[in-house]
Amino acid sequence: MKVDKESIVLYSLHIVRHEDGEREYRKEQIANAMGVAPNTFDLYLYRLVKRGLINRKKKRYQKDINKTITFTTDGFEEIERIEKTVDKLLLTTERHNISNMIKVQTILNRIKDPLEKVFFLSLYQKVKYFDLPMYLKTLRVAKMDINIVDIFSDLEVRSEEKTRLSFVESFYNTCLYGGAREGLSMEDVWKENDTNTLLVLAEANLRQGKIDEAREIHRYILDMRKDMTQNQWFKIQIDQAQALRKEGKMEEAVSHLDEVNKMTENKIFLAYLKGIKSMILANTGEHDKALELYHSAISSLNKFGLPILLSITHNNRGVNYFLMRRYEDAEKDWIKARRYAKDAGSHYGEAIVLPNLADIAVRGGKFDLADSYLKRARSIFEETSDYEGFAIVEFNYAIFYLFKGDIDKALECFKRSREIAFPLPPKQERDGLKEYFLSCVEETGMGPIENLI
């Protein structure tokens, strides 16, 4: 059963029209989500007008398509017919690498972004086979607005349409086949992918602790992609350092970053690199050395005005202050980090900071505020399926309950924080969290409990 392109265009207009809020949608965005050229999309609109399904109002300088398109009575009736057809569409085990059949409408209902709904429906209609688990995993990482791929992929020219089109083209060209293309090596699939999407795939694996898989993608890009940009090269180098960190190889991670430092003169790269190196040094207990590097990184980043990088670096420096028991300095940094995340429009960036602010609130006896911070962070991590994020929230709830005097709930949350993302975070970080938890047990007079954890 198929839905023709004109019907998808009409249904797409219906989808973006029924979103709550004041978001504007340009026809170029919808065209990109469908994987068609804007001129082709215009042709479909012309045909819909000729069929009497929509009316178009030519408004000069009006970019929002919802201000230039209205549906006729016949158009609404056609939309109802399309909805009934879409409701019968199925994702199957043979075509989509899943264990049970799922209705397409079920997936559409779970996708919040209207343009992603359009993209998914168009993908289903355009290609016979694609790997649904891989699609969902990659989409979750790609939509993380703190994703460094977006920052370093194209520092010279960045636009929403350019980034989205690259992502759409990659899926349409490769379909990220799983079992449906048995016998085809992953490298054959990667050949058809653009480098930015491969970087997203690598990061998706890295965030889930699949370090070998991430390295394989990095190796392929470095060996085979002759058109790789300096930005993409730097992203790979940072991810390789993060992979070493996640394996607990802190000294190797620092050495790798020192080598990268010698190979680039880009001042933004160097500033961000200092922030990553500082985080690794802090994890090994070199807090004073880390602090000196953090100061230098933030001083440089302030000159460039990239709010998401400032958010990341202020948040990490705040953690370093906190571990040094400099709680007021930590709070100042975390407040700044949250503000920068909001300036960047990054909900995910805010989620990274909120558990830290919850710790400060707990120490001030503001338990309701701390609880609201942690609930907000958890809801964002759920949307992106970030298991390390879940672990962070559970750990902070363990501290929350310790200071409330509920040792049973504290232990329950602490144990859960150790299991959710295992083997992440790496051993050194896990040991550091355990040490901090035990120090809080001593501070609150709830111990001894070493034999219980």
Image (cartoon, rainbow, N blue to C red):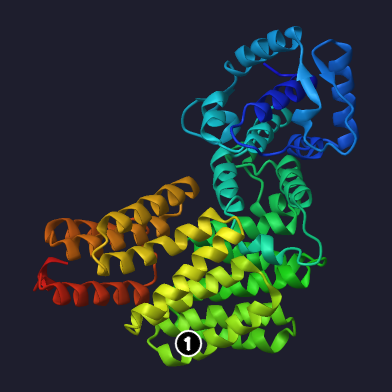
Q: Which residue is drawn at 63% across and 57% down?
A: 200
Q: Which residue is identified by label 1?
A: 290
Q: Which residue is drawn at 20% across and 77% down?
A: 439
Q: Which of 54 and 395 is in front in this view?
A: 54
Q: In this view, does 190 lie above or below 425?
A: above
**How far from the left and from the top, in percent, is residue 370?**
31, 58
Residue 423 seen in the current view? no
Q: Is residue 180 above or below residue 192?
A: above
Direction from residue 142 to residue 277 in the image, left or right: left
**How far from the left and from the top, in percent, is residue 340?**
57, 65
> In which quadrant of the rendered view does residue 115 lie?
top right
Q: Which residue is drawn at 77% across and 35% down?
A: 64
Crowding near the residue tagged with mark 1, few <14, some 14–19, many ≥20 C-alpha atoms within 10 Å: many
Residue 171 seen in the current view? yes
How many marks overall? 1
> In which quadrant of the rendered view does residue 282 lie?
bottom left
Q: Is residue 69 above or below residue 413?
A: above
**How far from the left and from the top, in percent, is residue 131?**
59, 39
Q: Nearer the viewer, residue 377 or 188?
A: 377
Which quadrant holds the N terminus?
Answer: top right
SS at mark 1 in the image: helix
Name the residue type under label 1.
Answer: Ala
Q: Is residue 420 above or below residue 359?
A: above
Direction from residue 246 to residue 114 in the image, left or right: right
Q: Which residue is drawn at 60% across and 74% down?
A: 238
**How far from the left and from the top, in percent, is residue 249?**
45, 80
Which quadrant holds the C terminus?
Answer: bottom left
> In which quadrant of the rendered view does residue 92 lie?
top right
